Image (cartoon, grey):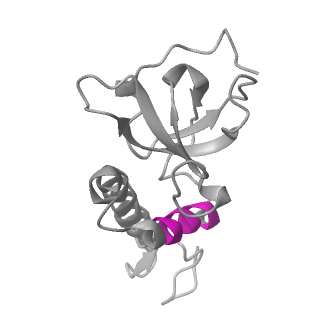
Amino acid sequence: MLDQHATAQTVADLTPGTIVRVLQNPHHPRIPHGAAIIVNAYGTPDTADMVIGWFWGMGPIEPGRTAHALFPRETIRQTTDLLTLPEGAFQVIQDRLGEAYTDVLTDTLGPLTKAVEEAANLRDCAAHAAWRCTSCQARNTINAPTCRTCGTY
């Protein structure tokens, strides 16, 4: 059911790559509810009053099946974003976005593709961030719980 008390949002608040929860709408049962990612504004950025939401868990982007035009009031922005999304879910988005990329969808998918690529780069940098061992000064990746050189914490 649509939540009459959800925080009011605008198209400008829902930029490509924003993770949202789409509320159930009894007037439009064909539109799924649950987790979605914002693909782009629906229409020109200056005049758009809707966004395109992709339910990535349902498959590659397919208009009318896994991607739908949504009013911002039908969504709740989540605190999870592309940087904090679990690795498995992020990988699904990357893989399925690649499957859907065609010349016809280039303009529509461009902003989401850019957001996902930027997040992938930042996620990769965070995974490979280094820390310096206080005992031997060796550099270690952030994923290493102990120094690879001397074995200390």
Q: Which residue appears farthest toward the bottom when viewing the image?
A: 149
Tell whether position 132 is magenta. Answer: no
Front-most of 33 and 19?
33
Q: Please identify the quarter of the rendering in which residue 44 is found.
A: top left
How far across and down, in percent of the image, does residue 64 sit? 56, 48
Quadrant placement of the C terminus: bottom right
How far across and down, in percent of the image, does residue 111 sit? 30, 50
Q: Please identify the quarter of the rendering in which residue 92 is found.
A: bottom right
Front-most of 57 and 153?
57
Name which residue lies at 47% across and 53% down. Answer: 83
Classify 141 as above or below 81: below
Identify the main secondary structure in magenta: helix
How far across and down, in percent of the image, does residue 112 sit? 37, 52
Name which residue lies at 43% across and 28% down. Answer: 50
Tell whether position 89 is magenta. Answer: yes
Name which residue lies at 59% across and 27% down. Answer: 76
> What is the span of residues highlighted in magenta in the rendered image?
88-97
How far across and down, in percent of the image, does residue 87 sit? 59, 65
Classify 135 as above or below 10: below
Quadrant placement of the N terminus: top right
Name which residue lies at 59% across and 24% down. Answer: 74
Classify 10 as above or below 41: above
**Does 36 sit left or right of 48 as displayed?**
right
Q: Which residue appears farthest toward the top when viewing the image?
A: 5
Instruction: Examine the rendering and report whether any part of residue 46 can be seen.
Output: yes
Classify 4 as above or below 106: above
